[in-house]
Amino acid sequence: MKYLESYKLFEAKKEKKYTGKNRIILLGPPSIGKSTISKELGKELGLEILHLDILNFGIMKDFSIKGRIKAVKTALNDKKYQDCILDFGGGHAYYKGVKEMIEDFRNIFVLIPTGDMKFSQKLLKDAEYKRLKAGMIDPIEHILKSLQSSDCEFSDEKKERLIEITKKIINRQAGELKPNEIPKKSLEKYGDMLKNGFLSGPNWDEYENYLTKENDKINRSLTDNIIEVFTEKGNRRSKSAIVNEIISKLK
């Protein structure tokens, strides 16, 4: 009986649809919502998500182009990620050699704002600023204020060291604060956002336009699955509508 149960489990794993070259890959510029959509898609399909930005910056801690290409290779070749939805960072797909690595994958989806390039670039700039303000600017400024407060729980020596790191981050330099280096007030205010600490790369607020004609050409050479995230009036479509559209096009 135990043998039969094991056999059924093996068969179930073997029949998983979205593994190997059938894995789901989400491409698109920064702030388009790939992480949000990949999470919703994962819930619907019962799949884990691998965010390449997290692999790149949180695990590998390599901010270079070479490091980002290495992250793609790891995501594609490491067995522990074979059943994951791959949420590509904004620029990962456009580095040298990456297109050739993924061109045989069957379930690639590109998220874009709209079909209008000029309007799309405006929407992305607005979305990027909101993302940075909520996820980087506001938290790091709150951390600095908490460190400078007279009721901060850290020693003067520790506060002095952490204030220096925090100011570097605010000045758009690379820096890292571990969870035990973030004041209690900031942890209480931002909760899950800071539970693993705070990490920034160099020039982290620099806007890089990945929505170019050249990149659009690469996208369309990889797939016909181009998903518009905003309406013509500039309103973001619902997560469920986007996820349902993706699911309807899966192979």
Image (cartoon, rainbow, N blue to C red):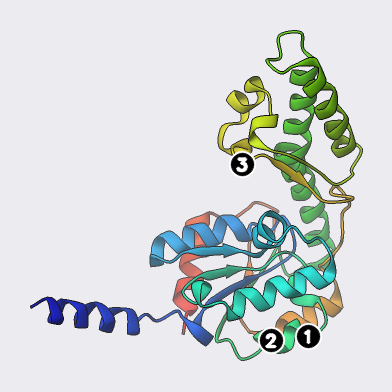
Q: Which residue is mark 3?
A: 196
Q: Does residue 105 appear left or right of residue 128 in this picture? A: left
Indicate which disc residue 97 carries: 1
Q: Residues within 10 Å of mark 1 (few under 14, many from 20)?
A: few
**Can residue 15 be seen in this snapshot?**
no
From the viewer's perspective, is residue 7 above or below residue 198? below
Identify the residue at horizontal 79%, vertical 28% (top origin).
141
From the viewer's perspective, is residue 83 above or below residue 184? below
Q: Position of residue 246 (x, y in %)?
A: 51, 71
State which tag comes first along the sequence, 3 or 2. Answer: 2
**Can residue 44 be seen in this snapshot?**
yes
> Which of the 4 quarters of the picture holds residue 144?
top right
Identify the residue at horizontal 77%, vertical 12% (top origin).
149
Labels 3, 2: front one? 3
Q: Which residue is mark 2?
A: 101
Q: Position of residue 36 (x, y in %)?
A: 57, 55
Marks counted in the figure total: 3
Question: Is disc 1 placed on a helix, strand or loop?
Answer: loop
Of residues 43 and 250, the one drawn nearer to the viewer in this rendering: 43
Task: Tell me the kind of residue under disc 2.
Answer: Met
Of residues 93 and 242, the one drawn nearer to the viewer in this rendering: 93
Question: Is disc 2 placed on a helix, strand or loop?
Answer: helix
From the viewer's perspective, is residue 236 above or below residue 217? above
Identify the residue at horizontal 68%, vertical 15% (top origin).
153
Asked if the residue under mark 2 is in contact with the one under mark 3, i.e. CB atoms within 8 Å, the reply is no
The answer for how far apart the CA atoms under marks 2 and 1 are is 7 Å
